[in-house]
Image (tube, grey):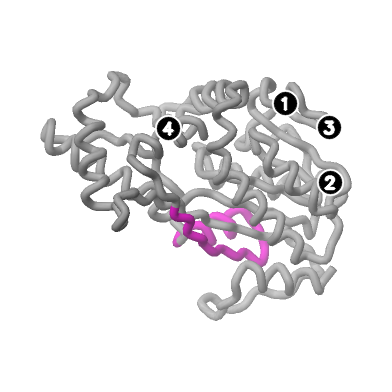
């Protein structure tokens, strides 16, 4: 682990392992399930069969199931950092890290990453690794949390802690900025990069129900620089009050925002269309995938 790492990835592994073994945690997979289905739907716009596909750190199997149901995949390989998450998988598996893929160059036709990219310490490096593993004209397709995800929770915790202690510490992880996402794809050497964003708003009775779901998703605070001393009950009670005051609907339920950033890019190949001049592209991800499929 580097001193410059943002996330405690060992802690992430531990939480995912616990949640995988907890039958009550399954209800909190709604976000990953929705994103996996959306990625599979976007993939269906490509009129192509992918003989070898790599599911990067899907950790629950939702992405793998969605890919299998689409009928476009020949062989699906699942990769996880923690071997415990692959114990019951019936299929091809690899234990490895997205930031250092144990896969040679030009090995797979498709790499899919569902809600794990934003939890890497070297996101540009992880995308470079994916491009390296892709065959020429292979597709990288990903979804990551970005934008104002959990902005209501972040603001409420900061306001409560500032009020009670005069200062605040980070308790919600940073997410990918959509303005940077296209640059990440280009820096990785992917052609025809396209980025768009979808907002999912979830409503809860209280902030505490949201936090329970985040724990069951394995998304509780995993910052390396997090304060190790547990937060006080007073802090969370005050944060819940502020949350309800500032981010509730007429019926009293509170809102939680999840901004999902979708990214796609192709490993360069001579058959691909030439990129447009900077600033001239106005296509959506769906349109780009349709256009690309015609080149197959």
**The residue stretch that appears in magenta:** 179-201
Disc 3 or 4, which lies upstream in sequence?
Answer: 3
According to the image, label 3 marks what residue? 91
Q: Position of residue 147 (x, y in %)?
A: 42, 55
Q: Are marks 4 and 2 in contact (CB under 8 Å)?
A: no
Which type of secondary structure does the marked residue at label 2 adopt?
strand
Q: Nearer the viewer, residue 18 or 191?
A: 18
Q: Position of residue 159 (x, y in %)?
A: 19, 42
Above or below 229: residue 48 = below
The structure residue drawn at horizontal position 61% and vertical position 26%, both measured from the top left corner, is: 20
Circle 4: is it few (<14), some (14-19), or many (20+) Cα within 10 Å?
some
The structure residue drawn at horizontal position 26% and vertical position 39%, both measured from the top left corner, is: 240
Which type of secondary structure does the marked residue at label 1 adopt?
helix
Could one spot residue 170 in this view of the protein? yes
Look at discs 2 and 3 and give the one toward the viewer: 3
According to the image, label 2 marks what residue? 52
Between the C-alphas of marks 3 and 4, the distance is: 32 Å
Could one spot residue 4 in this view of the protein? no
Q: Nearer the viewer, residue 198 or 187?
A: 198
Disc 4 or 1, which lies upstream in sequence?
Answer: 1
Furthest residue in direction front, as rendered? 251
Between the C-alphas of marks 2 and 1, the distance is: 18 Å
According to the image, label 4 marks what residue? 212
According to the image, label 1 marks what residue? 86
Q: Nearer the viewer, residue 276 or 263?
A: 263
Q: Position of residue 292 (x, y in %)?
A: 75, 70
The structure residue drawn at horizontal position 78% and vertical position 30%, both measured from the top left corner, is: 93
Between the C-alphas of marks 4 and 1, the distance is: 25 Å
Above or below 109: residue 122 = above
């Amino acid at each position: 682990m580097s001193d410059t790492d943002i996330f405690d990835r060992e802690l992430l592994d531990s939480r995912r392992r616990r949640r995988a073994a907890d039958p009550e945690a399954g209800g909190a997979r709604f976000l990953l399930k929705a994103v996996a289905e959306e990625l599979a739907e976007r993939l269906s716009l490509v009129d192509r069969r992918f003989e070898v596909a790599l599911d990067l750190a899907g950790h629950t199997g939702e992405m793998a199931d969605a890919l299998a149901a689409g009928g476009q995949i020949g062989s699906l390989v699942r990769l996880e950092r923690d071997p415990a998450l692959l114990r019951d998988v019936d299929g091809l598996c690899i234990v490895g890290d997205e930031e250092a893929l144990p896969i040679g160059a030009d090995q797979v036709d498709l790499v899919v990453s569902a809600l794990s990219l934003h939890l890497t310490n070297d996101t540009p490096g992880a995308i470079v690794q994916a491009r390296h593993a892709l065959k020429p004209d292979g597709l990288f397709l990903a979804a990551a949390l970005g934008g104002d995800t959990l902005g209501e929770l972040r603001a409420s915790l900061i306001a409560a802690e500032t009020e009670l202690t005069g200062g605040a510490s980070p308790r919600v992880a940073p997410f990918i900025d959509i303005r940077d996402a296209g640059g990440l794809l280009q820096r990785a050497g992917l052609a025809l990069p396209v980025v768009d964003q979808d907002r999912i708003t979830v409503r809860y009775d209280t902030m505490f129900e949201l936090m329970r779901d985040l724990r069951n998703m394995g998304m509780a605070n995993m910052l390396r620089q997090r304060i190790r001393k547990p937060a006080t009950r007073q802090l969370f009670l005050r944060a819940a009050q502020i949350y309800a005051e500032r981010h509730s609907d007429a019926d009293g339920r509170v809102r939680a925002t999840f901004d999902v950033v979708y990214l796609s890019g192709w490993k360069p190949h001579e058959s691909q269309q030439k990129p447009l001049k900077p600033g001239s592209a106005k296509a959506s991800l769906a349109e780009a995938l349709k256009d690309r499929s015609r080149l197959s």
